[in-house]
């Protein structure tokens, strides 16, 4: 036993595990799509902790799917290359030079870092982008944004094949177009919502760097209906960067996702807190 272990309450550890049983039973066989945003990634330790939670989810019989972002990492590489970049309504204006960098950074650097972290925790992970097996086919979202894609066709059989083999898919939000030579940059939340919708997922967890949807007094609202989200958007309570997330949530629910949670990915074990405890985490949106 290590000296620091002397003070641990092992009975509490055993109790925690025991208390998690009903949640494990509830979610056994459930499909859970986790959007891991660039701002939620933190350092190597945070990444390892996230990966461990994902491996645990798989271990207890869930089918986790990781869809990642990487906005800050794209920014750093664009800076190094001297390519200027701007955002319009939360999406990166993407020209040809930018889309090449986006694809390189997301499908290379960020995707493989997450795959590696999951493997290091004893899971099996395979990295892919929307291009692989035509998982996500897009059209241009808005001419003003250049090569920013809006998913129009999803082919999720490859994900079901990976589930059957016990493999955790890790997906970079880059997609192909109807013209196979096109590459689209897709907002990570949008991609996660489209994948969760196509899978009819039980849960979509949007991990970000804020604790959830806040009411007018700044308190996090733990549960909201789509109708309440619409009202809070109309009266301006939901604003700024939260809007693309709640829009993604509403669309995913419309497509048949049973619940969407917006939560702070920087909180240690955020996924486990949400799925395996009474406490939950962040804001759950469901009908
Ligand atoms: C995003 C894709 C990455 C992303 C971008 O270029 O930054 C668009 O804006 P986060 O870390 O989740 O913000 N794409 C169209 O969504 O990253």
Image (tube, grey):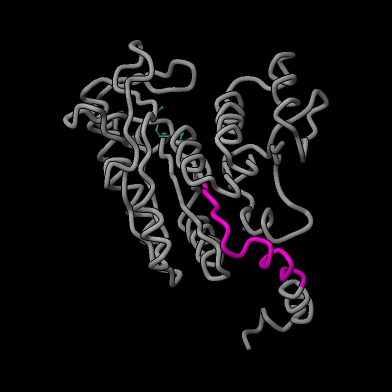
Q: Position of residue 123 (x, y in %)?
A: 43, 68
Foreground residue among 47 and 134:
134
User: Can you name the residue that lies furthest to the left here?
Assistant: 181
Q: Give the range drawn in magenta.
A: 19-34
Q: Position of residue 3 (x, y in %)?
A: 66, 84
- Image quadrant in which the C terminus is located: top right
Foreground residue among 251 and 265:
251
Q: In which quarter of the image is ligand 1?
A: top left
Relative to 199, residue 242 above or below: above
Magenta span includes 20: yes
Relative to 195, residue 145 above or below: above
Q: Residue at x 43, y 40 (%)?
A: 69
Relative to 230, residue 127 above or below: below
Task: Judge left or right: residue 277 versus residue 121.
Answer: right
- Image quadrant in which the N terminus is located: bottom right
Q: Where is residue 46 in the image (x, y as percent from the top left)?
A: 52, 55
Q: Residue at x 49, y 17 (%)?
A: 89
Q: For residue 218, what is the image quadrant?
A: top right
Q: Position of residue 82 (x, y in %)?
A: 25, 24
Foreground residue among 203 and 98:
203
Q: Residue at x 57, y 41 (%)?
A: 206
Foreground residue among 227 and 59:
227
Relative to 191, residue 34 above or below: below
Task: Judge left or right: residue 246 versus residue 72.
Answer: right
Task: Judge left or right: residue 70 versus residue 210.
Answer: left
């Amino acid at each position: 036993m290590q000296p620091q272990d002397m003070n641990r309450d092992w009975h509490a550890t055993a109790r925690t595990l025991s208390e998690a049983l009903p949640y494990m039973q509830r979610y056994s066989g459930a499909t859970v799509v986790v959007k891991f945003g660039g701002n939620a990634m933190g350092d190597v330790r945070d990444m390892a902790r996230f990966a461990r939670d994902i491996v645990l989810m798989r271990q207890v019989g869930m089918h986790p799917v990781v869809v990642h972002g990487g906005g800050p990492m794209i920014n750093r590489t664009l800076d190094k290359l001297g390519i200027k970049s701007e955002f319009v309504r939360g999406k990166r204006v993407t020209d040809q030079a930018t889309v090449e960098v986006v694809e390189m950074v997301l499908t290379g650097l960020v995707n493989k870092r997450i795959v590696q972290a999951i493997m290091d925790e004893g899971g099996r992970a395979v990295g892919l982008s929307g291009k692989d097996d035509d998982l996500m086919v897009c059209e241009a979202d808005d001419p003003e944004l250049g090569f920013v894609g809006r998913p129009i066709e999803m082919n999720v059989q490859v994900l079901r094949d990976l589930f059957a083999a016990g493999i955790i898919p890790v997906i970079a939000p880059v997609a192909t177009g109807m013209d196979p030579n096109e590459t689209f940059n897709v907002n990570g939340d949008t991609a996660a919502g489209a994948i969760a919708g196509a899978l009819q997922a039980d849960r979509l967890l949007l991990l970000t760097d804020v604790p959830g949807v806040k009411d007018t007094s700044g308190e996090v609202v733990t549960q909201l209906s789509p109708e309440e989200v619409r009202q809070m958007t109309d009266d301006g309570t939901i604003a700024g960067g939260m809007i693309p997330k709640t829009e993604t949530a509403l669309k995913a629910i419309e497509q048949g996702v049973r619940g969407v949670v917006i939560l702070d990915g920087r909180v240690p074990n955020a996924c486990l807190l949400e799925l395996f405890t009474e406490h939950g985490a962040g804001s759950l949106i469901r009908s």
